Amino acid sequence: MAGQGPNNEQPGSPQTSPDDDFRALFDRYHQAVFRQIVLILGRDRSAADDVAQETWLRIHRSLKTFEGRSGFYAWACRIASNEAKRWWGRNKKPGVLGAEPSVDPRESNERDDLVHAALRQVPEEFRNPLLLDLWEGFSVAEIASALDLPEGTVKSRLHRAREKFKQAWLELGGEE
């Protein structure tokens, strides 16, 4: 349910302290949020670590204002995306990269770079359920809960995400 903590308790409920809420959310979502940051920034581990730290500091400061209109994961990913954009604004010269910071997969022989580049081309509304499915191993019900979406919508978005990923993969030169 929207706004609920990882144990189906409302953050800030009498059963939990704010620090317990944060710790539980961090434990559950930090790897997934980190992977989202890596998708945005590319393979710069130091930058991803910096952005992840800023993201979780902002989440901690803002947790009491989380209204639950979206799932926690979607909210955390929006914060991570905003923090990554701030990082790019502070650390990269404008005009050097395109609209989406990335490594040009044609300049790399690594399959991982091609996967990341293709995933970055999948719109966020489709990419988030796909990441939760493939990388986190979440079920459709768990994805629906994390993103505060109906299960039918999750199934539809997963289908469309796979189509969009395949299209991007082929356009970037990946093998069918």
Image: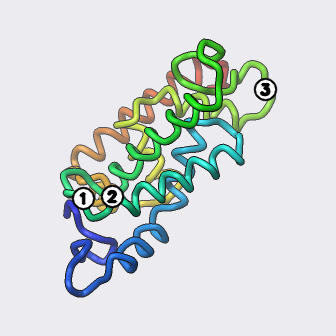
State the SS at label 1: helix
Instruction: Give coordinates of residue 135: x percent, y percent.
Output: 53, 53
Mark 1 closeness class: few <14, some 14–19, many ≥20 residues within 10 Å: few
Which label number is shown at residue 62?
Answer: 2
Q: Nearer the viewer, residue 22 or 38?
A: 22
Of tags 3 and 1, the one toward the viewer is: 1
* Marks 2 and 1 in Cβ contact (< 8 Å): yes
* Residue shown at 48% from the left, 58% from the top: 56
State the SS at label 3: loop
Outermost residue toward the bottom in this view: 15
Q: How many numbered tags mark residues here?
A: 3
Q: Nearer the viewer, residue 45 or 61?
A: 61
The residue tagged 1 is: 65
Q: Quadrant of residue 28?
A: bottom left
Outermost residue toward the top in this view: 95
Could you tell which of marks 3 and 2 lies nearer the N-terminus? 2
State the SS at label 2: helix
* Residue shown at 47% from the left, 59% from the top: 57
Q: Nearer the viewer, residue 164 or 42?
A: 42
Q: What is the image's colouring?
A: rainbow
Is residue 81 depicted above or below 91 in this figure? Answer: below
The residue tagged 3 is: 108
Q: Mark 3 belongs to which amino acid?
A: Ser
Mark 3 closeness class: few <14, some 14–19, many ≥20 residues within 10 Å: few
* Residue shown at 60% from the left, 12% from the top: 95
* Residue shown at 53% from the left, 24% from the top: 100
Left or right placement of residue 91 versus residue 77 in this view: right
